[in-house]
Image (tube, rainbow, N blue to C red):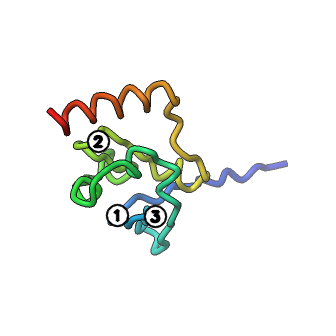
Amino acid sequence: MTTLAVQIETPTASNVSVSEDTLSVDLSDGRTISVPIEWFPRLVHATPKERMRWRLIGNGQGIHWEDIDEDVSVGGLLAGKPSGESQTSLRRWLSRRAGIISG
């Protein structure tokens, strides 16, 4: 018996937009995937300007927001995985952010 190996390629991101409630990613295969930004608490707490300042990483395998130190992978979005950041880490980040904004 022969076995046929099927290679599945994960599409890459080509464009990103973030609204008040949605993260939308245009993919190289023509699809657009949209998820609630509540999946990524740092995006929820980011300003509109910070949400707009993203760059593709890993040849489009992920998206990085420098201002808020957030990374999102295309594979994770396609798998339906929200942020894996712990509540402790998020609280620490929010505390540092409050000090920067008020200071």
**Residue type, numbered disc 2:** Ile
The quarter of the image holding the C terminus is: top left
Residue wearing tag 2: 68
Residue wearing tag 3: 21
Q: Position of residue 67 (x, y in %)?
A: 23, 43
The part of the image, by quadrant, that contains residue 51 is bottom left
Tally of numbered tags: 3
Q: Residue at x 33, y 29 (%)?
A: 95
Q: Residue at x 52, y 60 (%)?
A: 36
Residue wearing tag 1: 16
Q: Position of residue 29 (x, y in %)?
A: 46, 70
Mark earlier in primary sequence (3, 2): 3
- Contact between marks 1 and 2 (CB within 8 A): the answer is no
> Residue lying furthest front in this view?
102
Q: Position of residue 82 (x, y in %)?
A: 55, 46
Mark 1 → mark 2, Cα distance in angstroms? 16 Å
Q: Residue at x 56, y 56 (%)?
A: 78
Q: Is residue 74 left or right of residue 14?
A: right
Q: Secondary structure at mark 3?
A: loop
**How crowded is the residue under tag 1: few (<14 C-alpha within 10 Å), some, or many (20+)?**
many
**How crowded is the residue under tag 2: few (<14 C-alpha within 10 Å), some, or many (20+)?**
some
